[in-house]
Amino acid sequence: MAERDLPPYRKIADDLRALILSGELPPGDKLRSENELKDQYGTTRVTVRKALALLKADGLLVSEQGRGVFVRPRPNVQMLTTGANFRERRQTGVSNFSAEAEAQGLRPEQRILTVERVPAPTDVARLLGVDEGASVIVRRRAFFVNGEPMQLVDGYYAVALFGGTEVEESRRIRGGVSRLIEDPEGPVRQRITQFVEDLEIRMPSPLEIDALKIPPGVPLARVFRTAHTAAGQAIEVLDSRVPCDRHVFRYVIDVP
């Protein structure tokens, strides 16, 4: 549709969206009142409300009762993934998520929600190389930054390898499960040599909206990350659900 053919509320929404995305209206800024915007664009309050509703649905604006409409803050965490920082952080016992957040002056937190044995979901069974419905251990966690939820992460592990180990205990594992995998005296005793990530983008479920405080119009990234050992064995599957408005991911791929 040509710009001249757009309805007035779309033109207003597009104008405000451009100001937000360019940074001229930064996160946390309060918009002018509906009356001021009506006068600015020479239109009606009904048209202005439709424009603001569209931007709220896109996750760009939020309303605060009695205060007005604001550009939605974006508590982004920039995540850098390389083989080198995986090795470095495994030695320190600090997860990559926590290390990256702390480096940006943020306060990370991980909470273990549940640890249990469940039938392997279809996607997990395929990636982990077990029969669908086979018993696997799942460690469900929630990640926070400055008290705000950032992602949900479920880690899946074969019972045959990890049954009765620290993986089944409802507590943090220093260095993460990867430390246990590579421990010369652990249940696997192999080096992790590859991570494969499968990414899908979809709209969140009602439970995900509630748990992650996802505003209307914001999609969800679901990432399946499979760790492989030097022997080619799939040893861990992480199922992460990440709101698309609060993370920036960067992957460094070294090509020999």
Image (spheres, rainbow, N blue to C red):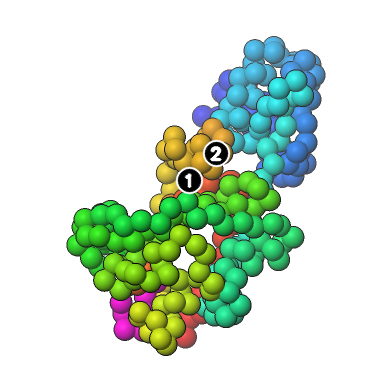
From this viewpoint, is residue 152 visible? yes
Residue linked to disc 1: 220
Q: Which numbered dot is residue 214?
A: 2
Q: Nearer the viewer, residue 104 or 50?
A: 104
Residue drawn at the location 58% of the way across and 74% of the way down: 93
Q: Examine the rendering and report whether any part of residue 154 can be seen.
A: no
Q: Is residue 91 left or right of residue 119?
A: right
Q: Is residue 230 left or right of residue 64?
A: left
**Residue 66: x %, y % from top left:** 75, 20
Q: Tell me the magenta residue range.
A: 225-234
Q: Position of residue 25 (x, y in %)?
A: 76, 38
User: In the rendered image, which quarter is residue 138 located in?
Assistant: bottom left
CB atoms of marks 1 and 2 within 8 Å: yes
Looking at the rendered structure, the secondary structure element under dot 1 is strand
The residue shown at (74%, 44%) is: 23
Q: Identify the secondary structure beneath mark 2.
A: loop
Residue drawn 37% across the image and 68% down it: 236
- Find residue 119 and report its image quarter: bottom left
The mark nearer the N terminus, 1 or 2, is 2
Q: Amino acid at mark 2?
A: Ile
From the viewer's side, name the closer residue of 134 and 41. Answer: 134
**Discs 1/2, front:** 2
Label 1 vs label 2: CA separation?
Answer: 9 Å
Magenta segment, principal secondary structure? strand
Q: Nearer the viewer, residue 196 or 168?
A: 168
On the image, the x and y values in percent for residue 97 come to 58, 63
**Crowding at label 1, few (<14), some or many (≥20) Cα neighbours within 10 Å?**
many
